[in-house]
Image (cartoon, rainbow, N blue to C red):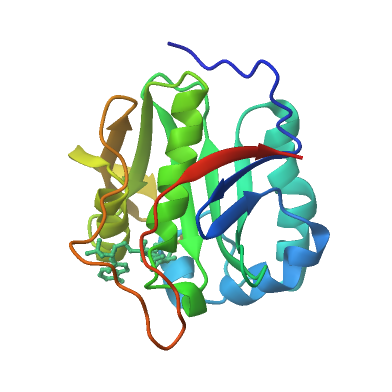
Amino acid sequence: MTLDLTGVDLLTESVSTHRLLLRPFRVDDAEAVCQACQDEDIQRWVVAVPSPYTLDDARHFVSELAWEERRTGTGLQFAVAERGSGRVAASVGLMRLRASIGAEIGYWVAPWARGHGYAAEATDALAGWAFRHGLHRVVLLIAPENTGSCRTAERAGFRREGRLREAEVARQGERRDFVLYARLATDPGLREPAGRHDDPKTGHQRHARGTETRRK
Ligand SMILES: CC(C)(COP(=O)(O)OP(=O)(O)OC[C@H]1O[C@@H](n2cnc3c(N)ncnc32)[C@H](O)[C@@H]1OP(=O)(O)O)[C@@H](O)C(=O)NCCC(=O)NCCS
């Protein structure tokens, strides 16, 4: 199967899950993006995020870079907003849509929004979107030391396939390994925890299922 975007307007395409809305970035997301990207883990693991990260970088990302991939049909960047509060909790993107090894998903979650299963839920939803539009493989490339992201991948139904030696050029020009995770259209998706993990303080439900595609 190959990618079939018949009837899809990439400029407006959104995906919703039980708790999250994956929507195109807007100009007024810049401050939330800038604040999140000050986080040292995002700076460490997401080399595409400039360091140091300024409000101008965030404005450039939300109003130009994120749109460029949608305009050219090479990828889709989404702001991940909590459906309840509307707050931008994360960013998730589907890139290299036509790569034979599989389209690639990348993500970060704002520090305040971590630990609720948002990364896994958004990744599962985006993989589901890709499979519904004809892709057979979706991959994640993760540094082996990035334990949190490896757990997110597994929670989202991805399987570890192997190690890509010195495949990434990190910030100082040093080379780092990647672990390749992949999910096929035929693989099971998001894994539920054994019991539901409702957070009594925030009322957040962890790892809720259910996705649908929404077009504006
Ligand atoms: C990694 C990251 C995306 C996780 O976001 P999150 O929304 O908190 O992750 P989830 O809640 O979906 O976690 C899924 C699983 O990973 C585990 N996990 C998440 N962060 C973890 C961490 N730092 N250490 C260990 N386990 C972690 C969760 O406990 C959960 O485990 P479970 O399946 O046993 O319940 C977030 O910490 C982040 O943005 N990090 C910096 C940027 C980054 O590394 N991006 C990925 C680059 S490849």
Q: Is residue 172 left or right of residue 178?
A: right
Residue 39 in sight: yes
**Number of residue marks:** 0
Q: Quadrant of the C terminus?
A: top right
- Residue 111 in the image: above or below residue 132: below
User: Which image quarter: residue 85?
Assistant: bottom right
Residue 170 in sight: no
| Quadrant assignment for ligand 1 | bottom left
At 78% across and 56% down in the image, what residue appears?
26
At 21% across and 66% down in the image, what residue appears?
195
Q: Is residue 62 left or right of residue 160?
A: right
Q: Quadrant of the N terminus?
A: top left
Q: Residue furthest bottom?
A: 201
At 39% across and 26% down in the image, what residue appears?
102
133 and 148: which one is in front? 133
Q: Is residue 193 left or right of residue 74?
A: left
At 36% across and 42% down in the image, what residue appears?
140
Give the x, y percent position of residue 92: 53, 51
User: Which image quarter: residue 174?
Assistant: bottom left
